[in-house]
Amino acid sequence: MKRSSYNNFFMNFATESKFGIIMALKDGPLSVNEIVNRVGDEQSAVSHSLRKMSGCHILNVRKDGKQRIYSLNEDTVLPMLKIVEKHVKKCCLGRDYDG
Amino acid sequence: MKRSSYNNFFMNFATESKFGIIMALKDGPLSVNEIVNRVGDEQSAVSHSLRKMSGCHILNVRKDGKQRIYSLNEDTVLPMLKIVEKHVKKCCLGRDYDG
DNA sequence: TTGTTATATGAACTTCTTTTCATATGATTT
DNA sequence: AAATCATATGAAAAGAAGTTCATATAACAA
């Protein structure tokens, strides 16, 4: 299972932990702690995810005192989510994927 | 690492093997053997991938004699690819993701 | 400068995915 | 009906990613 840049990119949406972070940030920027509280994972795990996600420029980071504020790269993420929502609505009503 | 429907969906783009299948199908429908020849993986591995991908309705299948012809769900896949291309062009010129 | 809060990092561990291998099924031809 | 071609399937092996734990760094406060 080798990954190219493209694959890494998609990987950031392909796990519940990372996808959860995206969802948490949909309503606006948050500090790491705030994210941790919303998603319910360990600080360390969240931090690891954030690193990868911002590495792929799916998230933006900004320093603010001792905090780091993460936000969505909306230009990329929002259209992405729209496509999937549409896809699921159209193709996967009710039932689950990958039976 | 739990996955929801959404996560499974993205997983179909997140590995080289599956992404390779998508690329192979960009120019039109292909039988399994044709896909196998283009991507260079084992028939069995390809078959496993195809199963998941069509399970998520990212690919369509059609029987034709003893062959099965797979094709892209273009409504979903093409816009998806466009977003990523744009993203990479804008955010990731030259360098690689996830350093 | 010591202590505390916020976040990051590295390595071991765990878990999920993919790959492989052997085999099964299904359709077609002879 | 037997042989062949095309594809699918299941389980074990291999590989990759996520999680955890302990600890480091960095900023700020006292």
Image: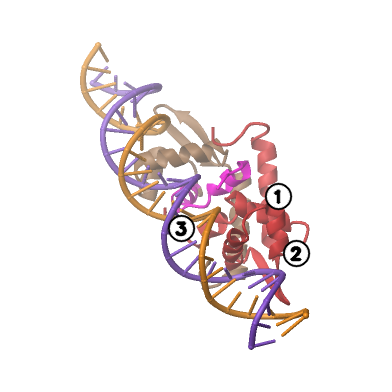
Chain colours: A red, B brown, C purple, D orange
Few, some or many C-alpha atoms within 10 Å of disc 2 (few <14, some 14-19, many ≥20)? Answer: some
For residue B84, the mark is none
Q: Which residue is mark 2?
A: A29
Name the amino acid type tagged 2: Pro
Q: Label 3: chain?
A: A
Q: CA distance from mark 1 to mark 2?
A: 20 Å
Find residue D1 and report its image quarter.
top left
In front: label 3 or label 2: 2
Q: Is residue B5 magenta?
A: yes
Three-letter residue code for mark 1: Lys
The three-letter code of the residue at mark 3 reads Arg
Sequence order check, earlier mark of 3 and 2: 3
The residue wearing badge 3 is A3
Q: State which chain disc 2 sits on.
A: A
CA–CA distance in space, label 3 to label 2: 29 Å
Q: Are marks 1 and 3 on the same chain?
A: yes
Residue B2: % across, % down: 57, 45
B32 or A40: nearer the viewer = A40
Q: Which mark is residue A82?
A: 1
Magenta residues?
Answer: B1-25
Question: Residue at left 63%, top 58%?
Answer: B83
Tell which subunit mark 1 falls on.
A
Residue C28: image quadrant is top left
The foreground one among D29 and B94 is D29
Graded by Cα atoms within 10 Å as few (under 14), some (14 to 19) or many (20 or more), the crowding at tag 3 reads: some
Q: Of circles 1 and 2, which is in front?
A: 2
Describe the element under mark 1 as helix, strand or loop. helix
Asked whether residue A97 is drawn in magenta, I would say no
- Seen in the picture, residue B39 relative to A62 is either above or below; the reply is above
Secondary structure, mark 2, is: loop
